[in-house]
Image (cartoon, rainbow, N blue to C red):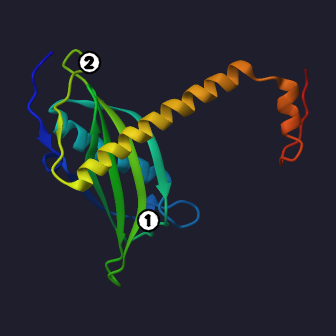
Amino acid sequence: MQNLSGRKVEYSKTTITELMIPSYANFGGKIHGGILLSLIDKVAYACASKHAGTYCVTVSIDVVDFLQPIEVGELVSLHASINFVGNTSLIVGIKVIAENVKNGSVKHTNTSYVTMVAKDDDNKPTQVPPLILESKTDVRRFVEAMKRKELKQSFKEKMDETKSTLDLDEAVETLEDQRCELKLSD
């Protein structure tokens, strides 16, 4: 196991700012969610790779909360920082801010958590440096990320259990008050 020196959260903090142009808009005239997801992935890569000192790949985007729409012409800034590191994985927290340069208004539009894995030159997972926590905010974010990981694992286990023990007749009964129509062919 390699001995890696820890890195401070500040070391890899990354901000990407981009002007939202008309070609980024969806049919409703707001910035398309896919554009934001692409920018989120980009800033997560930059932040994680800087901390790890190597290439990183996206494993999951655990949460993307769309809080407010983004308009064409706004400046969007994505602020990323490392919230958690495991052995080879990193969780990047991202806050998206949109600024209307005409009227000076600023709004928090998105929050996201992206799990990345560091890769070595042979494309194998590789150990990342520890994270040096210097503030109460750093500690809170690290502990929250640990809790999200636990909840995600617990949810996965419960869903796997549900799949393996699902009784179709019982499942059909639970659908009686739902907005669906059953037209089973078998």
* Distance between the alpha carbons at the discs numbered 2 and 1: 38 Å
Earlier in the chain: of badge 2 and badge 1, it is 1
Q: Nearer the viewer, residue 127 or 155?
A: 155
Task: For residue 42, say whether it is visible.
Answer: no
Percent across and percent down for residue 128 are 20, 29
Q: Quadrant of residue 130?
A: top left
Relative height, residue 88 to residue 142 (above, below)? above
Q: At x 47% / y 50%, what residue is drawn?
A: 64
Nearest the eye: 51 or 135: 135
Residue 42 in the image: state x and y as whole percent: 31, 45
Location of residue 145 by image quarter:
top left
In the rendered structure, are the residues bearing label 2 and label 1 in contact, judged by CB atoms less than 8 Å apart? no
Which one is in front in this view, the residue at disc 2 or the one at disc 1?
A: 2
Q: Which mark is residue 22?
A: 1
Instruction: Give the vertical position of 39 relative to 18 (above or below).
Output: above
Please provide percent x and percent y for residue 90. Answer: 29, 35
The kind of residue tagged 2 is Asn
- Residue pictured at 12% horizontal, 40% vertical: 7
| Residue 9 spot, x, y in % from top left | 18, 47
Q: Which residue is mark 2?
A: 123
The image quadrant that residue 113 belongs to is: top left
Label 1 sits on a secondary structure element that is helix
